[in-house]
Image: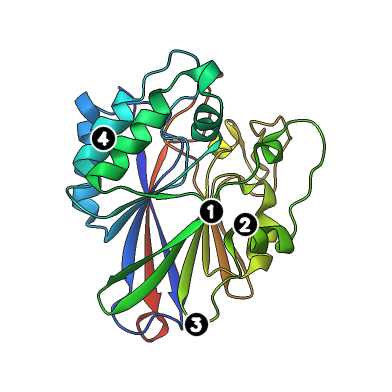
Amino acid sequence: MKKFKIVKYEIISEKLKQQGFRAAVISDLHNLEFGQKNERLLQALKEGKPDMLLIAGDLVLGKKGASVHKAYEFLREAVKLFPVFYSLGNHEQRMKQQPEIYGKGYLMLEKKLRRIGVVMLENTTRIWEGKGEKVLLTGLMLPYSYYARRGKQRLEKRDLNRLVGKASKEEFQILLAHTPKYGDTYLEWGGDLTLSGHYHGGMVRVPFLGGAVSPDLRLFPKYCRGHFEREGHHLIVSAGLGEHTIPLRVFNPRELLFIDCLPKSRG
């Protein structure tokens, strides 16, 4: 039986004035199920009592013939419990952009998810309000070339500004950016919290060195798993819940994240 662990983080911000909020974060599930219809994952979410569920990409498996039904069944139940915001990963993106290869399953999934109330974030920003707080939720969808294994395409702050606009100086803003490859740029952009996944924790965790290899075959990538902070801007990278192609995890447990974002007065 596949297992996952609960990982909790805490973020303190002067932009939050009242009660703060709790976000649950899922990344890289890749059609994996924990119990029938993901009942164990749903139960863990219920027990965590988040104010929102954030999907940081790759809920599905972008392969020919792969079903999207498991993703729909899971989110159909999750959206009954709390608001769900879904930012695409590279697997969703290639299925969306190349239906001639992967079929129209993802396109149908997206329509059904919007219909049941899942908020899709594709270089767009939506507002969540609750507990006296106002939070901006932004989903980044990079051109697919930024996932290429070959080449060293750079992502600059001006590129982020062009894709999703400038970071807010007044409101607490979360950026969902699937690949942590451009973590330095996300931190420079200026959002309060960036959430990434994609690297699956580096597959093999080496003591004192971290994750060994990324999906784009980079050894010991800088932002592989964990919490990073620069001048009050935070990046949290999830090790994810699933895997694909090379189903390998060594000293690298699957993760469901809960992040408490709190006002400075409560930190």
Question: Is 221 on the left-hand or right-hand side of 35?
Answer: right
Instruction: Measure how far apart labels 1 and 4 are at the Cα level.
Output: 24 Å
Closer to the N terminus: mark 3 or mark 2? 2
The three-letter code of the residue at mark 3 reads: Glu
Closer to the N terminus: mark 1 or mark 4? 4
Instruction: Measure how far apart labels 4 and 3 are at the Cα level.
Output: 34 Å
Question: Is 140 on the left-hand or right-hand side of 43?
Answer: right
Secondary element type, mark 3: loop
The three-letter code of the residue at mark 1 reads: Asn
Instruction: Measure how far apart labels 3 and 2 are at the Cα level.
Output: 20 Å
Nearest-to-viewer mark from 3 and 2: 2
**According to the image, what is the colour scheme of the structure?**
rainbow
Q: Are marks 4 and 3 in contact (CB under 8 Å)?
A: no
**Label 2: how many residues lie within 10 Å, few (<14), some (14-19) or many (20+)?**
some
Q: Which residue is mark 4?
A: 74
Q: Which residue is mark 2?
A: 163
Residue 8 location (% of width, % of height): 38, 56
The three-letter code of the residue at mark 4 reads: Phe
The three-letter code of the residue at mark 2 reads: Leu
Residue 126 location (% of width, % of height): 40, 62
Mark number, residue 123: 1
Secondary element type, mark 2: helix
Secondary element type, mark 1: loop
Give the residue furthest to the top: 65
Q: Which residue is mark 3?
A: 170
